[in-house]
Image (cartoon, rainbow, N blue to C red):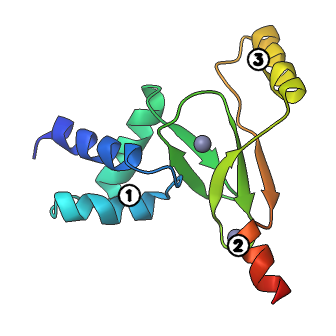
Amino acid sequence: MNYSRQRETVYNVLRSTKEHPSADWIYGECKKIMPSIGLATVYRNLEQLVLQGKAIKVPVGQDKYRYDADISLHCHGACTVCGKVWDEEISATLNDALNAECEKNHSDGFSLTFFRVCEDCMAKQEQ
Ligand SMILES: [Zn+2]
Ligand SMILES: [Zn+2]
């Protein structure tokens, strides 16, 4: 099995969505393209993509992560009911403050996730 082709498949699947998928979801999609690929391989390649700076890992609770091919500095929102993850709009003031903090600390980036109930789940609760 060609390692670079596996990594490319994982990367292409991740890049094809804005849904911030879980490793399991990525695995499912990769299997459609490359039926012999294993879950451990998908995990390993995701970690490599993160290390290479091609993807970011979004922590969404204890030992739970979602992946994002958008490596620009941005914040996330995560739904505490359905687990959906999205790009959260933050104020310019907060954005400037976060970037200034990164610069001060020589950080490569930050990960900030707001946990709340998403609009879909909110609408369902109101019914
Ligand atoms: Zn939700
Ligand atoms: Zn994102």
Label 2 packing within 10 angstroms: few (<14), some (14-19), many (20+): few
**10 Å crowding of disc 3: few (<14), some (14-19), many (20+):** some
Evaluate if marks 3 and 2 touch, with contact meaning CB atoms under 8 Å apart.
Answer: no
Instruction: Identify the mark at residue 120; answer none if there is no mark.
Output: 2
Point 79% across, 13% down: residue: 105
Q: Which circle marks residue 26 in the picture?
A: 1
| Residue drawn at 39 percent across, 51 percent down | 43
Q: At 21% across and 65% down in the image, what residue appears?
A: 32
Cβ of mark 2 under 8 Å from ligand 1: the answer is: yes
Rendering quarter of residue 127: bottom right
Residue 124 in the figure: left or right of residue 1: right
Mark 3 vs mark 2: in front = 2
- N-terminal of the two: label 1 or label 3? 1
List x then y, in percent, for residue 13: 33, 50
Q: CA distance from mark 1 to mark 3?
A: 30 Å
> Which residue position holds label 3?
102
Identify which residue, 83 or 86, lies in the foreground: 86
Instruction: Mark 1 or mark 2: name the one nearer the start of the chain.
Output: 1
- The image quadrant in which ligand 1 is located: bottom right
Query: Quick one: SS at disc 2?
Result: helix
Assess whether mark 2 and mark 1 are in contact (beta carbons under 8 angstroms).
Answer: no
Numbered marks: total: 3
What amino acid is found at the position of numbered circle 1 in the picture? Ile
Measured along the vertical axis of the image, is residue 92 above or below residue 39? above
Where residue 99 appears, as percent x and y from the top left, is: 77, 18
